[in-house]
Image (cartoon, coloured by chain):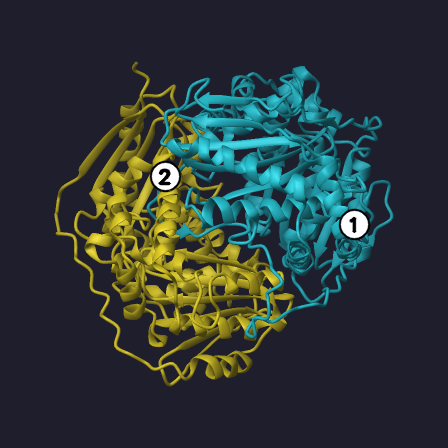
Chain colours: A cyan, B yellow
């Protein structure tokens, strides 16, 4: 995250708005509600992803009627998973320094250039990759590539900016250590994958290191990671294909070829059934849990995906089993849900909620009870139909902005999907049967869950 | 939270957006029509979108809640999902989910909005269901109890577990000692405990009238089509008297700056705030747009002079920025906020800010600063067609004294802000009415 102009934890009183919920409801095949329209048709997805021939993977979707275009550029495994243990944390600072100047262009000049050419810019380093996202108008596309070439080959990373931006990030990380959801996540990653795994690189470790990086280290890391071998490009919106192709070629040729990107092996989460307690003096306890998951490309993945939706997926308001039992029937939480974590260096099946301290044990018991019920009896045909219906019918919403489309396509590309995956994805969902889901429940669901609890509890308080 | 006010100026239409030299932007087609029962329809045609975003906006929010039951608007918003006579219990949720739609609802000080994103072919279904729950809300007493628990947990999540929740409540109260803006939209626990089955229904019957609502639709649809559907489902709902939105005013206190100092073990940095009186759209439009630009000029974009001086050159703070309560029916505030660089003293920062502010009042900003701030304010407008939802939220100005036309003209009015307007706005802001220092509590 870029701090800069965004005030972290701003106390602005502007627009105090209370959202009812994020995410989306789960669907249901309504029983003969005359007023409820039953949709049986599966939306035909027609995302025309063009593969532009280059030395690097390039996907593009042309919207000639639009005037907005989004360019996403990612360097595969340039984030935590590709760093050596000594380098962990540097990618975040590097990503945040990429608009602080390059070559003989100062940071200020670069930011003015973006403003003058109407380029909306953000850069991020996740667990996995370093990604730059730039949205602009058709006419400014050449300026995007002009800037990219400089930023990626000659980043300045001046000591003054390291100090300034590094302090901003450090302040934000220090604050995160007081936020229970982040502390729960750190503890969960450590419990699931072991303390030395890149996913377990904690907020605290990151904060300790963020001001230790030097200009030569940052520039060397940039040189190592910003290579042709790691580069992936997605463009969505208004462009001329020939001109775009030339721009991309110019960018590719500006970068060193680099070494082959090492493949990763994905670890299974280590589910011991323990309860880990992180003490924090807060009135509401954050409860999170995990068990073993499945790799993204596993043949049972979609069955597990739908099973997850029945239990607590898609932020279901009244339909998912956990929401029904914990929120709707008992008023014990504002939200509860679970999701699949299926990434290149590890997988798990995780969930989370928050409840007042005195209800923590009750909520933990309810989660275990619902988990065991599904493991034992599976889900019903009705439940499967409703989550399938939601999964396929909501899919077009993924593609309703150039930026949304570009980000999703980049994710697919880095996951190793084919360019026509969006047009096939719904058929994969449709082909899952009740038998598949219930067999997967038997195979994958465990009789124990590992819990991570952050709140006003001490060891032994919860069982 | 900040996101919403950012979004606000992004939208509306840009008729003449400057880019480089001359980059004209076609106006976004905001169209409106009002039915004979007073129900307003606003349509923003976005032909490149595959889906429609529909919002039903009610002109009622926290500031209209009963004194002893603040947050009732928010609680009603929750219960609006508990069904109607014809569509009991969770039928609404199921119906939208079944077509892969996404629904949500928001409550602010001055408005409540129910939104749905669905395929364009499902627009009629959404309008039909919104018409139904505008008239026929029906829920059981026991649902009030379980939902009360949900809202108490929501409060714990947003306020009590939030390291800045308590500070935020103190600040609101100091800024608005009498006006209901002084209590957050979720209310205090004793307010939440005071809601009853009857009071929720009373609130619903009082405010959820067609003449106190607007249907806002963004997507590949035209006004005629939406009006036809609205006429069919909402046209028959009788108009009725709705109370005047008259809130208790705060007393006018002149030449006084309040101050709050707060130590907190869960705060990691020294955070300094300075609040000035803002202005409503209804009170002074010229000043209103000038403050919108000024908020950008004072740090809300990455090449502002204040950011350069305070963060990059003098390293006095890690971040600095300004915000303006532009989406308020009654007077809100203009705030400047900074996170101190812990290598520097609070006194040094405050002295530097005082000098900077004094200098701005005397000499005014450089004209290129103003131009840059306008450009940054209008930049987002360019990308509004890329996001239906941001446009929907922008249209909540309808509940804060703006007409659809006002909203549509935002870009040209921002463009028209002059150097003199900015100077006048700075002078208007004058001295702070409240300053706040939030310190990490390192003792013990």
Q: CA distance from mark 1 to mark 2?
A: 45 Å
Quadrant hosting residue A372: top right
Given residues B384 and A267, the one toward you in this image is A267
Residue that mark 1 sits on: A59
Helix, strand or loop at mark 2: helix
Residue A157 left/right relative to B292: right
Residue A179 left/right relative to A314: left
Given residues B88 and A14, the one toward you in this image is B88
Residue at 50% over, 73% down:
B127
Q: Residues within 10 Å of mark 1 (few under 14, many from 20)?
A: many
Residue A228 left/right relative to B431: right
Pointer 2 indicates a residue of which chain?
A: B
Residue that mark 2 sits on: B156
x, y (%) of residue A62? 75, 59
Pointer 1 indicates a residue of which chain?
A: A
- Asked if residue A331 can be seen in this view, the reply is yes
Residues at marks 1 and 2 touching, judged by CB atoms closer than 8 Å: no
Helix, strand or loop at mark 1: strand
Quadrant hosting residue B443: top left
x, y (%) of residue A289? 57, 31
x, y (%) of residue A220? 70, 21
x, y (%) of residue A337? 55, 42
Q: Residues within 10 Å of mark 2 (few under 14, many from 20)?
A: many
Given residues B353 and B121, the one toward you in this image is B121
């Amino acid at each position: 995250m870029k701090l800069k102009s965004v005030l972290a934890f701003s106390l602005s009183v502007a627009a105090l708005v209370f959202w009812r919920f994020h995410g989306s409801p789960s669907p249901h095949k309504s029983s003969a509600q005359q007023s409820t329209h039953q949709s049986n048709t599966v939306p035909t997805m027609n995302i025309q992803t063009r593969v532009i021939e280059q030395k690097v993977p390039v996907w593009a979707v042309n919207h000639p009627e639009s005037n907005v275009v989004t360019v996403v550029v990612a360097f595969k495994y340039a984030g935590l998973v590709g760093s050596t243990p000594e380098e962990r944390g540097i990618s975040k600072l590097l990503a945040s320094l990429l608009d602080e100047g390059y070559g003989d262009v100062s940071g200020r000049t670069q930011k003015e250039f973006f403003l003058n050419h109407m380029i909306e810019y953000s850069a991020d380093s996740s667990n996995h990759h370093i990604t730059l996202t730039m949205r602009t108008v058709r006419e400014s596309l050449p300026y995007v590539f002009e800037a990219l070439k400089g930023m990626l080959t000659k980043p300045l990373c001046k000591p003054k900016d390291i100090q300034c931006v590094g302090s901003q990030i450090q302040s934000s990380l220090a604050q995160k250590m007081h936020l229970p959801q982040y502390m729960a996540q750190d503890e969960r990653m450590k419990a699931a994958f072991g303390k030395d795994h890149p996913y377990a690189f904690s907020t605290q470790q990151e904060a300790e290191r963020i001001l230790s990086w030097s200009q030569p280290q940052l520039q060397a890391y940039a040189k190592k990671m910003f290579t042709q071998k790691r580069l992936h490009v997605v463009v969505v919106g208004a462009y001329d294909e020939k001109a775009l192709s030339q721009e991309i070629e110019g960018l590719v040729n500006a970068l060193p070829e680099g070494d082959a990107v090492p493949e990763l092996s994905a670890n299974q989460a280590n589910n011991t059934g323990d309860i880990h307690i992180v003490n924090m003096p807060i009135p509401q306890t954050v409860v999170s849990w995990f068990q073993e998951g499945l790799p993204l490309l596993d043949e049972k993945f979609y069955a597990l995906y739908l099973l997850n939706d029945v239990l607590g997926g898609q932020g279901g308001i009244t339909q998912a089993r956990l929401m029904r039992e914990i929120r709707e029937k008992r008023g014990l939480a504002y939200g509860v849900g679970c999701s699949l974590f299926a990434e290149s260096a590890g997988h798990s099946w995780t969930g989370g909620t928050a409840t007042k301290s005195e209800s923590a044990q009750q909520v933990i018991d309810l989660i275990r009870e619902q988990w065991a019920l599904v493991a034992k009896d599976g889900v019903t045909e009705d439940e499967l139909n409703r989550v399938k219906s939601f999964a396929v019918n909501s899919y077009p919403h993924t593609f309703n902005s150039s930026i949304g489309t570009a980000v999703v396509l980049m994710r697919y590309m880095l996951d190793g999907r084919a360019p026509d995956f969006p047009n096939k994805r719904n058929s994969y969902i449709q082909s899952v049967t009740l038998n598949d889901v219930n067999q997967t429940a038997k195979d994958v669901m465990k009789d124990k869950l590992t819990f991570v609890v952050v709140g006003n509890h001490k060891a032994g308080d919860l069982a | 939270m900040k996101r919403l006010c950012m979004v606000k100026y992004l939208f509306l239409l840009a008729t003449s957006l400057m880019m480089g030299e001359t980059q004209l932007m076609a106006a976004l087609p905001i169209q409106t029509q009002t039915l004979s029962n007073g129900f307003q329809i606003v349509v923003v045609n976005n032909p490149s979108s595959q889906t429609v975003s529909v919002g039903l906006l009610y002109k009622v929010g926290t500031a209209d809640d009963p004194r002893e039951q603040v947050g009732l608007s928010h609680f009603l918003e929750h219960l609006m999902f508990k069904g109607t006579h014809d569509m009991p219990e969770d039928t609404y949720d199921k119906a939208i989910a079944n077509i892969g739609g996404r629904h949500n609802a928001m409550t602010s000080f001055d408005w409540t909005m129910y939104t749905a994103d669905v395929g364009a072919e499902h627009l009629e279904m959404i309008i039909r269901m919104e018409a139904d729950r505008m008239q026929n809300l029906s829920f059981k007493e026991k649902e009030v109890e379980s939902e009360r628990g949900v809202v108490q947990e929501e409060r714990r999540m947003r306020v009590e577990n939030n390291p800045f929740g308590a500070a935020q409540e103190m600040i609101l109260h100091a800024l608005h000692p009498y006006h209901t803006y002084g209590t957050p939209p979720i209310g205090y626990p004793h307010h939440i405990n005071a809601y009853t089955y009857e009071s929720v229904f009373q609130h619903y019957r009082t405010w959820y009238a067609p003449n106190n609502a607007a249907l806002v639709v963004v997507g590949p649809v035209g006004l005629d089509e939406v009006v036809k559907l609205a006429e069919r489902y909402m046209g028959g709902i009788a108009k009725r008297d709705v109370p005047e939105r008259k809130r208790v005013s705060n007393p006018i206190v002149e030449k006084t700056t309040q101050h709050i100092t707060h130590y907190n073990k869960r705060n990691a940095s020294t955070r300094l705030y300075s609040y000035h009186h803002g202005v409503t759209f209804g009170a002074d439009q010229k000043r209103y747009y000038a403050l919108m630009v000024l908020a950008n000029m004072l740090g809300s974009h990455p090449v502002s002079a204040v950011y350069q001086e305070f963060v990059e050159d003098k390293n006095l703070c890690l971040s600095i920025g300004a915000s303006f309560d532009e989406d308020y029916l009654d007077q809100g505030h203009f705030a400047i906020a900074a996170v101190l660089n812990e290598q520097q003293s609070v006194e040094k920062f405050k002295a530097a800010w005082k000098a900077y502010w004094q200098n701005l009042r005397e000499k005014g900003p450089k004209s290129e600063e103003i131009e840059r701030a306008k450009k940054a304010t209008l930049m987002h407008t360019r990308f509004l067609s890329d996001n239906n939802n941001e446009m929907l939220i922008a249209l909540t100005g309808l509940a804060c004294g703006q007409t659809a036309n006002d909203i549509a003209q935002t870009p040209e009015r921002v463009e028209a802000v002059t150097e003199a307007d900015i100077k006048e706005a700075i002078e208007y802001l004058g001295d702070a009415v409240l300053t706040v220092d939030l310190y990490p509590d390192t003792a013990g």
